[in-house]
Amino acid sequence: MPLGPPPAPGRPGLPAATQAVLGDKGAHLRPGGLRAEEYQFTDSGIFLITPDRHYNLLVAEHGFPPEQHRLRIPIDLGHPGQVVQHQRPLVLANTDESPDFRQILKTARMGSAVFGPLFWRGQMLGQIITAAQARYTYSATDLDILMGFVHVAATVYIAHGGQSGSAPSCDRA
């Protein structure tokens, strides 16, 4: 199975790989999958918790517009904030059924999403989020697979100098 287009230069391939592997590729074809004005696409990002623990900082992405690279969202915003608060993975099969869903992607509201928290030695470092515009793209099975990606990402982050959960500074570009 091809993994799709290569990631943008300088960006890790993990977000692109989650898009290629996860999700029901036919979700957009079923009734209710998309609204009339929508089309199926996916995005994925790795968010690390900033050292001051005030933000989730987007450090690697695939499918986000360039101006959202290094996006900072408050640590308690929406479902990413719930994942930080409860320190548990989350799947939203249909975001329309979640009245507290908050749009993060600048270009569109996503219809389905999975959130996988990254841990090292009991401390949450951040999370990987993969989303699709079509509702019911992701399920509990996709969340299980995402958690495999998450464990690899946490290990690689630590192996490449991440220390005790310290994320890049918000001031670095």
Image (cartoon, grey):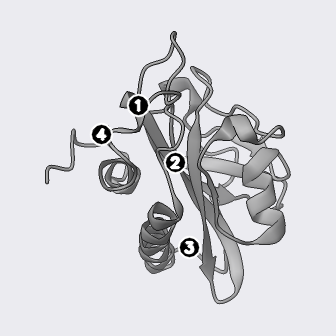
Q: Is residue 5 above or below residue 40?
A: below
Question: In percent of the image, x 66 and y 70: which residue is there?
Answer: 125
Foreground residue, 115 or 57? Answer: 115
Q: Which residue is mark 1?
A: 28
Q: Nearer the viewer, mark 1 or mark 2?
A: 1
Q: CA distance from mark 3 to mark 2?
A: 18 Å
Secondary element at tag 4: loop
Q: Which residue is mark 4?
A: 9
Q: Is residue 65 above or below residue 48?
A: above
Q: Which residue is mark 2?
A: 45
Looking at the figure, which quarter contains the N terminus? bottom left
x, y percentage for residue 43?
46, 38
Q: Nearer the viewer, mark 1 or mark 3?
A: 1
x, y percentage for residue 66?
48, 26
**Contact, mark 1 vs mark 2 (Cβ under 8 Å):** no
Question: In percent of the image, x 62 and y 26: which residue is there?
Answer: 109
Secondary element at tag 1: helix
55 left or right, relative to 157: right
Foreground residue, 58 or 76? Answer: 76
Amino acid identity at mark 4: Pro
Q: Residue furthest bottom?
A: 121
Q: Which residue is mark 3?
A: 162
Earlier sequence position, callout 2 versus callout 4:
4
Earlier sequence position, callout 1 versus callout 2:
1
Amino acid identity at mark 2: Gly
